C-alpha cells in the first residue's frame, strides 16, 4: 500500500480573470499569479503558501521587462531562494510539466507542499503599448513583437513565423490523411469548437461566454475573418486575455493532517512527455505527430486506464488540428466535449498557461461528481512539446512512487525518416501541405506550399497567383498530393500548379 506521505494530491485551485476598464489599473503577470495563488490557498482552506517547498511558474511574455519573475514573486510571497523556479519557455505543456514535477517532489519526499502557477496580462500589456505608441491594439500583438527586428530566416521568408502560420500545415495534411473533404474537415472543427463554446458559456472563469454554432465558427465573415487557411478567427487561440491560475499540491497525509475533506482531494496520476524536433521542417510528417501519440498512449498506460475509463478530457486546443489528432489517438468521440474549460478560443489563451486553467476546472469538475478520472493533455511550441497526466478522485496505480515521465526514446523510435530540406530546389514536386495567409480585411494575401521532390526531399514555395490560391482554398479538389513545379524567382521559390 502506498505511503500517504508520498501520495501527491491537489487540495486547492484558483483562477483570476482581470477585465479593467482602464488598462493602467490592470494587474500585470506577477499580480495575476499572486492573486491566483491566493485564490488556491483559500480553496484549500488557508495557511498553505507560507509552507511552500516548491513553486513552479509558467514563464510569461506579456510583461517581458519583469523577467525573470521568480525572484520577484518569491519576494512578494516571502519565500526563500531556491523555492521558486520558472519553466524553460512559455510553452503550452509547461503547466502539466510543472504539475508532474510537483507530484514527483512529493513522491520523493523532497517537499510537503508545492504549487504551480502562471499568468498572462496580454490584453492589458497590448492596450498600454497601444496607448504609448498612439496606435492600435492589433499592432501590439505580443507574439509578432517577439520576432520583430530579427533577420528573417528561410521559413520566415515564406511566411511561417508564428504558430498560427504553422499549425495549418498539420490541419491540411491531416484532413487529406483522414480522407475528408474540405467541408467535412471544417465541419469536424466546427463541431469540436462549438462544444468548446458551450462549455465556456457556462464556466465563470472562461473569457468568452457566448455559445456558437458550428456554422458560425467555420464561416468567414467580417466579424470572423479568415486568418490562415482553413482557420478563421473563432478557430484560433485568443491571446488577448488577462488570466491567472494556480494549483496547490501536497501529500495525502499532509492534506488529512490539515483537515482537507476527502471529497476535495484529487489524486495526481503519472504523467508522460515527448516532443518533436524544434524545427518544424525537420519532422517526418504533418498528418500526425509520433510524439503526441506516444505521450498520450503512455500516459494512459502508466495509469492503467483506457479511453472508456475517462469521464473528462482536456485536449489542448490552440488550433483544431491538435484535438483532432489527439482524439484519434485515444479514441475520443467528436460528440463528447474535449474540454472542461472552453478551449483556447473561448476559455482564453494566455500563451503557456492555458492548461493551468484546465487543471483548475478539471479539479472542480471531479470534485463536483462529473466523473472519476480526467485526462489533461498539453501541447506547446509549433506542435512541438507534449505532456499528459491523469487526475482522479481515487488513487491510481503507481500513486506514491516517483516516475520518469520522459518517453522521448519511444517517440524517436516511432518517427519515420525526416526528408532532406532543399532551400534552392527548382523542378517538379508534389504538395505535402500548405496554407494561405489573409489580410485583416479578409482578402487572401499569399500562401506557402510545403512540397516534396520526386526524390522525397522537402522544400518551400510561395503562392502568389489568384488561380492557385483558389485551387488551394475552394475545396473542389484535394490539393495535398497534387503535382506542380517549383520555380526560382529571385531569392524565393514559387509554386506553379500543373
Image (cartoon, rainbow, N blue to C red):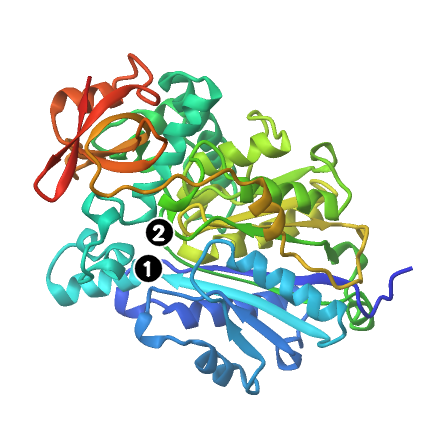
Residue 340, given in percent of the width and then of the height, sits at 57, 43
For disc 1, the marked residue is 122
Pointers 1 and 2 in contact (C-beta within 8 Å): yes
Q: Nearer the viewer, residue 406 or 245?
A: 406
Whichever of labels 1 and 2 marks the residue nearer the N terminus, that label is: 1
Residue 170 in sight = yes
Q: Position of residue 478 (x, y in %)?
A: 33, 17
On residue 239, which mark appears? 2
Secondary structure under the numbered disc 2 in the rendered image: loop
**Quadrant location of the C terminus in the rendered image:** top left
Q: Nearer the viewer, residue 493 or 7?
A: 493
Q: In x, y percent, where is residue 284? A: 45, 39
Q: Please determine whether, in this image, residue 321 is positioned above or below residue 496.
A: below
The answer to whether residue 22 of the structure is visible from this angle is no
- Left or right: 364 in relation to 228: right
Quadrant in the picture for residue 460: top left
Q: Is residue 15 above or below residue 386?
A: below
Amino acid at each position: 500500500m502506498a505511503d500517504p506521505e508520498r501520495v501527491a494530491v491537489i487540495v486547492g485551485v484558483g483562477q483570476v480573470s482581470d477585465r479593467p476598464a482602464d488598462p493602467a489599473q490592470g494587474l500585470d503577470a506577477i499580480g495575476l499569479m499572486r492573486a491566483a495563488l491566493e485564490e488556491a490557498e483559500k480553496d484549500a482552506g488557508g495557511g498553505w503558501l507560507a509552507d511552500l517547498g516548491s513553486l513552479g511558474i509558467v514563464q510569461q511574455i506579456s510583461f517581458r521587462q519583469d523577467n525573470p519573475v521568480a525572484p520577484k514573486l518569491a519576494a512578494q510571497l516571502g519565500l526563500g531562494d531556491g523555492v521558486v523556479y520558472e519553466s524553460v519557455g512559455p510553452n503550452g505543456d509547461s503547466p502539466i510539466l510543472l504539475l508532474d514535477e510537483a507530484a514527483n517532489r512529493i513522491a520523493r519526499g523532497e517537499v510537503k507542499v508545492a504549487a504551480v502557477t502562471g499568468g498572462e496580462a496580454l490584453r492589458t500589456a497590448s492596450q498600454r503599448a497601444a496607448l504609448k505608441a498612439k496606435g492600435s491594439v492589433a499592432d501590439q500583438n505580443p507574439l509578432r513583437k517577439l520576432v520583430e527586428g530579427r533577420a528573417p530566416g528561410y521559413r520566415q521568408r515564406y511566411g511561417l513565423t508564428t504558430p498560427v502560420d504553422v499549425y495549418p500545415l498539420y490541419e491540411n495534411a491531416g484532413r487529406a490523411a483522414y480522407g475528408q473533404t474540405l467541408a467535412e474537415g471544417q465541419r469536424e472543427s466546427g463541431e469540436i469548437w462549438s462544444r468548446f463554446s458551450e462549455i465556456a458559456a457556462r464556466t465563470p472563469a472562461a473569457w468568452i461566454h457566448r455559445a456558437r454554432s458550428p456554422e458560425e465558427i467555420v464561416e468567414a465573415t467580417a466579424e470572423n475573418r479568415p486568418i490562415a487557411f482553413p482557420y478563421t478567427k473563432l478557430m484560433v487561440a485568443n491571446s488577448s486575455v488577462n488570466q491567472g491560475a494556480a494549483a496547490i499540491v501536497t501529500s495525502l497525509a499532509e492534506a488529512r493532517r490539515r483537515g482537507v475533506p476527502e471529497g476535495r482531494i484529487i489524486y495526481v496520476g503519472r504523467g508522460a512527455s515527448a516532443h518533436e524536433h524544434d524545427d518544424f521542417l525537420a519532422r517526418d510528417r504533418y498528418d500526425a505527430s509520433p510524439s503526441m501519440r506516444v505521450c498520450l498512449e503512455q500516459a494512459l498506460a502508466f495509469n492503467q486506464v483506457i479511453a472508456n475509463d475517462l469521464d473528462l478530457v482536456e485536449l489542448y486546443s490552440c488550433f483544431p488540428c491538435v484535438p483532432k489528432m489527439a482524439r484519434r489517438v485515444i479514441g475520443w468521440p467528436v460528440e463528447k466535449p474535449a474540454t472542461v474549460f472552453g478551449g483556447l478560443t473561448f476559455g482564453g489563451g494566455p500563451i503557456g498557461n492555458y492548461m493551468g486553467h484546465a487543471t483548475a476546472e478539471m479539479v472542480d469538475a471531479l470534485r463536483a461528481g462529473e466523473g472519476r478520472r480526467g485526462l489533461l493533455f498539453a501541447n506547446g511550441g509549433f506542435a512541438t512539446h507534449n505532456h499528459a497526466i491523469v487526475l482522479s478522485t481515487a488513487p491510481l496505480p503507481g500513486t506514491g512512487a516517483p516516475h520518469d515521465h520522459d518517453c522521448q526514446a519511444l517517440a524517436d523510435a516511432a518517427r519515420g525518416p525526416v526528408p532532406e530540406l532543399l532551400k534552392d530546389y527548382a523542378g517538379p514536386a508534389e504538395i505535402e501541405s500548405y496554407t494561405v495567409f489573409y489580410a485583416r480585411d479578409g482578402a487572401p494575401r499569399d500562401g506557402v506550399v510545403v512540397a516534396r521532390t520526386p526524390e522525397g526531399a522537402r522544400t518551400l514555395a510561395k503562392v502568389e497567383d489568384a488561380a492557385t490560391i483558389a485551387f488551394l482554398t475552394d475545396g473542389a479538389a484535394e490539393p495535398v498530393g497534387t503535382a506542380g513545379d517549383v520555380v526560382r524567382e529571385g531569392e524565393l521559390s514559387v509554386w506553379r500548379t500543373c
